[in-house]
Image (cartoon, rainbow, N blue to C red):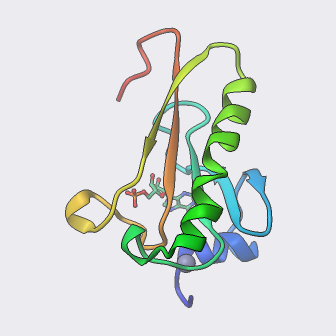
């Protein structure tokens, strides 16, 4: 999709720090870290939001999220929880219209909340 920043991240036109990648999804660090390790998981197929997922795409993306979440958690002993957030539509605070899931690690110290 032309002019989609996340499609450009998939092609490498815009640089990103990859956390996980396979044929269906890419996971990379959010440019604005809510907490350290804040990761975005996106389908490689451009869909604007959750309303555009068919069953097959949902299976591809949703089955990978727990695996990616576990890998992030395993990367740091002090991660004790995680928020998984998905905004759909500008009224729901979506700002990039290539569907994505925020994985926001939460730490044993409780001073990391924004
Ligand atoms: P939304 O508000 O749509 O749910 O989340 C979009 C997220 O994309 C934001 O957390 C924002 O920081 C992140 N973001 C926007 N542009 C870029 C970029 O060029 N690179 C990366 N890595 N993240 C981005
Ligand atoms: Zn896109």
Measuring 70% from the left and 14% from the top, which residue is drawn there? 77
Measuring 41% from the left and 67% from the top, which residue is drawn there? 50
Measuring 58% from the left and 31% from the top, which residue is drawn there? 36
> Is 10 situated left or right of 3 in this image?
right
Residue lying furthest right: 22
The residue closer to the viewer here, 114 or 87, is: 87
The image shows a total of numbered marks equal to 0
The quarter of the image holding the C terminus is top left
Residue 78 in percent (x, y) is at 63, 13
> Compared with residue 68, is residue 88 higher up or lower down, i.e. above or below?
below
Residue 30 in percent (x, y) is at 56, 49
Measuring 38% from the left and 24% from the top, which residue is drawn there? 113
> Is 14 situated left or right of 114 in this image?
right
Residue lying furthest left: 91
| The quarter of the picture showing ligand 2 | bottom right
The quarter of the image holding the N terminus is bottom right
Residue lying furthest top: 109
The residue closer to the viewer here, 30 or 56, is: 56
Residue 46 in percent (x, y) is at 56, 79
Residue lying furthest bottom: 2
The residue closer to the viewer here, 16 or 71, is: 71
> Is 16 situated left or right of 49 in this image?
right
Residue 112 in percent (x, y) is at 44, 20
> Compared with residue 74, is residue 108 higher up or lower down, i.e. above or below?
above
> Compared with residue 78, is residue 96 higher up or lower down, i.e. above or below?
below
């Amino acid at each position: 999709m032309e002019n989609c920043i996340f499609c450009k991240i998939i092609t490498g036109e815009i640089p990103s720090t990859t956390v996980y990648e396979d044929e269906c999804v890419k996971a990379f660090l959010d440019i604005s870290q809510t907490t350290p390790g804040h990761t975005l998981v996106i389908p490689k197929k451009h869909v604007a939001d959750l309303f555009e997922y068919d069953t097959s795409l949902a299976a591809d993306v949703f089955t990978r999220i727990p695996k990616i979440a576990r890998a992030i958690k395993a990367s740091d002993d002090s991660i004790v929880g995680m928020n998984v957030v998905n905004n759909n539509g500008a009224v729901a605070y979506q700002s990039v219209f290539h569907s994505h899931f925020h994985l926001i690690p939460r730490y044993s110290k409780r001073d990391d909340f924004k």
